[in-house]
Amino acid sequence: MLDLRYDRVKIIRGDDAIKDNFDSISGIGRKAFLVTGKNSAVRSGARDEITEALEKLRIPYVIFDKVTENPKSLTCFDAGIICRENCCDFVIGIGGGSVIDASKAIACYALHEDFKNDTDIFECDGKCLPIVAVVTTSGTGSEANRYSVLTVGDNRKISFKSEYSYPLLSFVCPKFTVTMNDEQTVSTALDAFAHSIESFLSPKSDEVSENAALYSGREIWNVLLKSPRDPSGLSLEDREKLSYAADYAGIAIDITGTGFPHPLGYGLTIDYGIPHGKACAVFEKDFIKYNMRTEKGREKIERFSEYIGASPEEIMNKTYELSGINMKLTDDIIANIISRVEKASNFANSPYVLNKKEMFDIYKELFE
Ligand code: NAP
Ligand code: FE
């Protein structure tokens, strides 16, 4: 593993991270608001380990288990009120990126009695209750950064971030990802890989983000190469690699943000239910193709490819193949999807800056 220091979040890694370090939760707060989705916190075993730790520490808790995929800002607004009414003074999110992102928003809503609706969060001082993250997927890296991607209304994904929305403490236990099926595992790995390459090409990248992106990119690529693989599934060693690499990719994007595959993918996720990682991966070949047109982009793609041990064409083909998306969209539908994301700052976050016609061309070529 590259020697990398990132002091924004205390991350404790390892399958026994909670059992061996449960007392690190002590002192964060007096009553916990536990945030989960419907099933995975329980199925993965993570919720039991946390409640056991809280009981040992004599910290009471309230459970909120209504977070869905692509969490709604409105759900977080409502949960913030419940958190406040129960006098909880810290939030523990147990789940995938959706739950960790929702926990950050709930921690902010809970502290802001003055908020009138579910969009005030994007205009506020960002102050939050302390957040603990227990991650059960290996993709978003939300446990290592300050981002919270929320769905506003029915069909817009908007990022909230603040200096306060870093988890104070994160537990990354690869064993919790074992209950993910192949589709979820590949999709979340593709998301983390998208973070690596998109961060590496960002004009905002620095030495820390570049090292994190290279390290995570190589680890994830080596596991992705095995997909599709034999039915016995992924080894625990590979799951460990993915979990830690996703973390590093999460640190990389904390410094740089993501590139244009992210906003281009949002419509596929919101309108057609395509998992986030796959929805980004289908655009990765265009991300490489367009950026290859600039000197800086070409130089960076060559460095990234060489480090992970693949050619740019292999990366383009593999990410496209693993996205597995095969659908047709009309011009009107494409125009509607693009109208919702065309102003995203991600489009300026790579050496090549796409214009609106090119966004449309990319969609047409993929989905005509
Ligand atoms: P997710 O949306 O959190 O979870 C997807 C599904 O997987 C859910 O049904 C969930 O079930 C289930 N699941 C989670 N862990 C599982 C486990 N161990 N075993 C079995 N099933 C499990 O997936 P994700 O890819 O981690 O997160 C995607 C979200 O994160 C998107 O909203 C995306 O925009 C956002 N995102 C955030 C960042 C960031 O930096 N903050 C970066 C990229 C993406 P339950 O509902 O039962 O929990
Ligand atoms: Fe992502």
Image: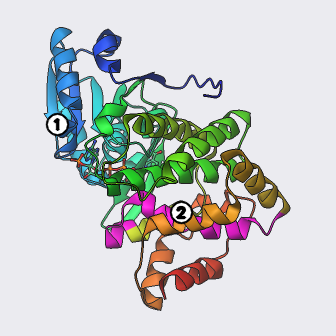
Q: Amino acid at mark 1?
A: Val
Give the label on residue 319, or none. Answer: 2
Mark 1 to mark 2: distance in Å?
31 Å
Q: Nearer the viewer, residue 336 or 271?
A: 271
Instruction: Specify the quadrant that holds the N terminus.
Output: top right
Query: What's the magenta bit mostly, secondary-structure-wise?
Result: helix
* Magenta-drawn stretch contains 276: yes
- Is residue 138 left or right of 351 when viewed as pictured? left
Q: Nearer the viewer, residue 205 or 43?
A: 43
- Say above or below: 185 vs 214: below
Residue 51 at x, y = what percent? 17, 22
Residue 72 at x, y = what percent? 29, 54
Foreground label between 1 and 2: 2
What span is in magenta?
Answer: 269-294
Q: Amino acid at mark 2?
A: Thr
Residue displayed at 62% across by 38% down:
215
Residue displayed at 17% across by 39% down:
43
Q: Earlier in the sequence, mark 1 or mark 2?
A: 1
Say which element carries label 2: helix
- Is residue 332 left or right of 270 when viewed as pictured? right
Residue displayed at 31% across by 54% down:
231
Give the label on residue 320, or none. Answer: none
Rendered image quadrant of residue 325: bottom left
Badge 2: few (under 14), some or many (20 or more) residues near its Cα, within 10 Å? many
Badge 1: few (under 14), some or many (20 or more) residues near its Cα, within 10 Å? some
Residue 100 at x, y = what percent? 35, 39
Taking the image as drawn, is residue 65 in sight?
Answer: yes
**Mark 1 — residue?**
42
Rendered image quadrant of residue 34: top left
